Image: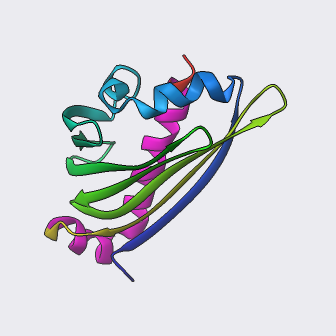
Amino acid sequence: MSRRYRFTDSWWLPVAPTDLHPRLADLEGYPAWWPEVRAVASLGPDDALVVCRSRLPYDLELHLHAVHRRPDLLETALDGDLHGWVRWRLSDEDGGTRLVFEQEVTVRSRVLALASYLVRPLLVWNHDRMLDSAIRNLVR
């Protein structure tokens, strides 16, 4: 077992990439549509502090730094309780958007590091619930 996690998911959404991109690029707006993103504090045009909580009773505190903001790719470096990166890839498909989520992180929090060894499937389930919520609420 490892403290490293890699996630990849893909969805088709009935929204044009040009409409979806600004919503995904606006970190400060995430709490309005993504309930698991509890708080966002801007630290400037490329940086923010973010607090997330999904179904399990713990908060993730993350420092996010924008790496890419291209129309087809939003990429952010993560530091804090998790260290790594997250990407949203957007492409036109059948009158909507093919949205691909990729994330690779290493757990840094001591509590989560221990949990990674003991209950890894539960942490993956928790992450999946958070993404399910994001996709459900993103196009509302």
* Residue 66: percent from left, percent from top: 36, 47
Is residue 137 rendered to the left or right of residue 42?
right
Q: Is the magenta stretch mostly helix, strand or loop?
A: helix
The answer to whether residue 7 is magenta is no
Q: In this view, does 82 lie to the left or right of 127?
A: left
Viewed as shown, does residue 24 lie left or right of 31? Answer: right
Is residue 35 among the parts visible in the rendering? yes
Percent x, y for residue 91? 71, 40
35 relative to 72, above or below = above
Visible residue check, residue 58: no
Residue most extreme to the right: 94
The residue under the point 48% across, 34% down is 134
Q: Quadrant of the C terminus?
A: top right
Residue 14: x and y, percent? 71, 23
Q: Residue 83 at x, y = what percent? A: 29, 65
Q: Which stretch did the figure color magenta?
A: 111-137
Q: Residue at x 22, y 74 (%)?
A: 114
Q: In which quarter of the image is residue 115?
A: bottom left
Q: In this view, does 107 lie above or below 30?
A: below
Residue for point 59% across, 37% down: 71
Residue at the bottom extreme?
A: 1
